[in-house]
Amino acid sequence: MAAMAAGSWVLVTGGVWDWQSPVRIGGEALHLRLDALSALFLVLVAVLGGAGALYAWEYWSDAGHPVSAPRGRFWWSALLLSMGLVLLSSNGLHFLIAWELFALAGFFLITLDSRNPEVRGAGWLYLAASHAGTLMLFAFFALLAARTGSWELGPMRDQAGLGSLFWLALLGFGVKAGLFPLHIWLPSAHANAPSHVSAILSGVAIKLGIYGIVRFSGWLPVPVAAGWLVAVLGVVSAVLGVVFALGQHELKRLLAYHSVENIGIILIGVGFAMVAAARDHAAWGVLALAGGLLHVWNHGLFKSLLFLGAGSVVHATGTREMSRLGGLWRAMPWTASMFALGAVAISGLPPLNGFVSEWLVYLGLFDAVHDPGATLWAAIPAIVLLAMTGALALACFVKVCGVVFLGAPRSEGAVQAHECGRWMRAPMLALALGCAGIGLAPMAFWPALRSTVGAWHGAWASAPAPQSLGTLGMIHLALVLSAVGGGIWLWRQISRGGLVRGLTWDCGYAAPTARMQYTAGSFAGIITEWFAWILQPVRRAARPEGTFPGHARIEEHTPETVLERVVEPVARLVIRGSGMVRRLQNGRAQAYLFYLILGLAAVAAMTLAWSEPELLHGGGE
Amino acid sequence: MSAIVEFLVRLAVWLLLAPLLPGLINKVKAWVAGRRGPPVLQLYYDLARLWRKGVVLSTLASPGFVVGPAVAWVAVLGAALLLPLGPLGISLSFRGDVILLVYLLALARFCTTWAALETGSAFEGMGAAREVSYAVLTEAAVITAVLALSLRSGSVELGTMLASSAGTGSVLLAAGLFTVLLAENCRVPFDDPNTHLELTMIHEVMVLDHSGPPLAVVLHGAAMKLLLFAVLLVEAVLPFGEWSGLGGAVALIGGVALVGVGVGLVESWLARYAFKRVPLLLTTAFLLCLFALLVAWKGGWS
């Protein structure tokens, strides 16, 4: 609550809250600083942290999980606190400490259900990837401290030599954000974590990666090439994220891939803003950055909403497999309608929030097309691919909603489903209201965006609101009103004419079964076929043969292509190499003596070869 | 006051004239085949009849089955109202309205396919899957066409973008947009609006289970969408900014009628393509728009 209040205050006024304490941790004075950029993320942490905590009260209740529920609450608080610290700390060392705490808290939350081997595997993968990222950040902050002479962080655009460090930061934060080739940990971690944890991981935790990229692209004198790279990575993540999502049959894994997609959309905005800042094009840079940053909020809201909805489905049916669900709207009307709202929002459709941020990014990109300069060739493919991403996301979410909530139940679990309780519904309702609020009154959020943009790049602090943003809000409102009016009118006409319930028309076939429904795999089949080159689906089929065909079956599965085809072979190679190195450690004293002599000989040889004095005496500095 | 009158006229044009275009297309098809064909006003009769009828609802359908068509209809109407209408000009112009138009059509698609999946029928699932899949390619083609127009006019407002002609790239753009029109409105060679084979259809199969007033809303929405694409195509190609009053009105009506005749002729002379070839044709449409974009970018600033 306090974080929320402080964050909102800073966002609205655009001020900076700075607090230095005499307390020293690790030899460095504690220095906290809250500017609009941190505040934007802090508000998100506060909102989603609160919503998730309420949700967990019922979803991961003490009665159902006597051991892990209290543990979950502890790590939940630890996660929120450490994320707050990451956002506030203005000292490289403390940033790293908070970052590590945050990663560890995330690990313990993911593995709450630690008896399940799949969950443990996902947890380890998360931990390994997270530490690979942290390693980069260690290098980044250490080099930064070495070059500036202090661990203090702050704007250092004037020190030209620091630009190249941004690549390290991009890599380190990119792993956390789940950029496309670095996303390997993300699907399994999000799929196997308890749903409120998936919600906060997807809603906020990966956003801290974005925070890092945005923060340090604002503070460091980044090269223009970095802006281009971020934009390209954004486009790749957006398109491939949604394509992989289409190939999934598991509800939460699918949602996890959509996080990759949305991170991509955010980074398209950020990347183009970086290019604009480097070339001093304020007009479209502001729009692109504002769109990207608003998408941070939006994605936090609707993705958490969707994960909480998915959690309710899992809670009620006990399965994440979409092919076992169906027809859930009857048992769970609340969850179904909230999920539908989230689906419309994430597909970037008017009149909800997803469209507002994508629209801002589009406007920025269109202006980049009109700007004389070399941005046109990049903005055009970005726009086209962004449009295709939107259409693909729509396809994916029609599939999810249709297969999970509509039609007939495909399994006993789906028949027995029940609506979730009050404590699970309330957070979903709050998030849904947030989605609708940003969609219907986007102008109310512009001041916050403006101060954030100003915190990123001082020269853009006074950017005027795009006039059409208000018009868009009005149109959205008109749209909602006329849709409600139209719906009521249609319903009255139907009730006047009479309504009969009948069997679904299946070409005159009188006994359709639930198994005859279109499945998730067949729904996405056309598109996954187009992208088979990257999805590499595994197919096992027994075709019907002969005049009287017997048993026939088809099974299709999309693997974690990047993980299984790229990272694992490399990892195996590394392990084999390490195994060979391990043979040196064989426990025989003779061998160790031999190494000693060999080492001494090598040192002697080196000393003889380069006997410059500074090399001999320079080591102690 | 005049703004309200103008808005009402605009609304009347979209609501009342839209069902005329499918009638015209059917008349052309009948004429080529040497038949007399249904009257031009046939769709009006159908709509009036459907509106008074009762409804048979699938036992599996949720309220979304009725809400879906209603929202889709509102979205298409909203998108249509954003378009400038020849001499009437544009009612509400703002930066980025063209993106709203594209996404309103996407919203309509979401709602139609949602309603299609309500009944749990494999046929409707099939139709919905095709609709959303091919839309990926049409969306790319549409946004490329928008980019071409935007690059030429230096604006992101429909009013300015459609005021001048598309210049040298007009032919390419017209061909691309015409193909998109055929695909988005489920006409031959992508789909056959007359077929009764559920397995081979897109749009008609999605609305198999709709009846009565909801079906009327679906049909009217489809007619509005067809008119919308026809108007967009005509205004993208012709310089309506230079014509006013009667000349503009005649040009718009003539152009839309010409598009209708074109659709009719294509439907008479072409057979529906196999589904495997549909993506190829849509990619061609995308490439046509892309070349129009290149023309707008690199030359032809007439």
Image (cartoon, coloured by chain):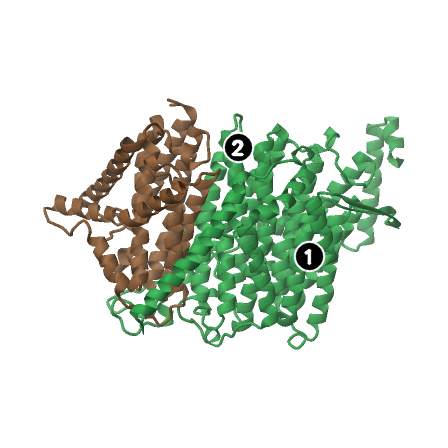
Chain colours: A green, B brown
Residue at 88% x, 27% y is: A613
The disc label shown at residue A46, or none: 1
Q: Position of residue A121 (x, y in %)?
A: 62, 62
Residue B134 drawn at (x, y percent)? 36, 49
Task: Check chain identity for marks 1 and 2: say if they share one.
Answer: yes
Q: Where does residue B37 sit, x and y in percent of width and height? A: 13, 50
**Front residue of this view, candidates B26 and A463:** A463
Chain where mark 2 sits? A
At mark 1, the secondary structure is helix
Q: Residue furthest front?
A: B1
Q: Would residue B211 be visible to someone looking at this image?
A: no
Q: Secondary structure at mark 2?
A: helix
Q: Which residue is mark 2?
A: A368
Marks 1 and 2, how far apart at CA: 35 Å
Does residue A579 sit above or below A50 in this rendering?
above
Amino acid under disc 2: Ala
Within 10 Å of the Cα at label 2, are there few (<14), some (14-19), or many (20+) other Cα atoms? many
Q: Residue at x 52, y 67 (%)?
A: A335
Give the amino acid at mark 1: Ala
In the picture, the disc for residue A205 is: none
Q: Quadrant of the rendered structure where residue A213 is? A: top right
> Mark 1 — on which chain does it sit?
A
Judge by depth and name the residue closer to the eye, A274 or A520.
Answer: A274
Give neighbour class at mark 1: few <14, some 14-19, many 20+ (Cα, 10 Å): many
Give how far across and how far down residue A10 sits, in percent. Answer: 72, 47
Determine which quarter of the picture holds residue A155: top right
Q: Are marks 1 and 2 in contact (CB under 8 Å)?
A: no
Q: Quadrant of the N terminus of chain A?
A: bottom right
In the displayed structure image, the side of residue A378 where residue A297 appears, left or right: right
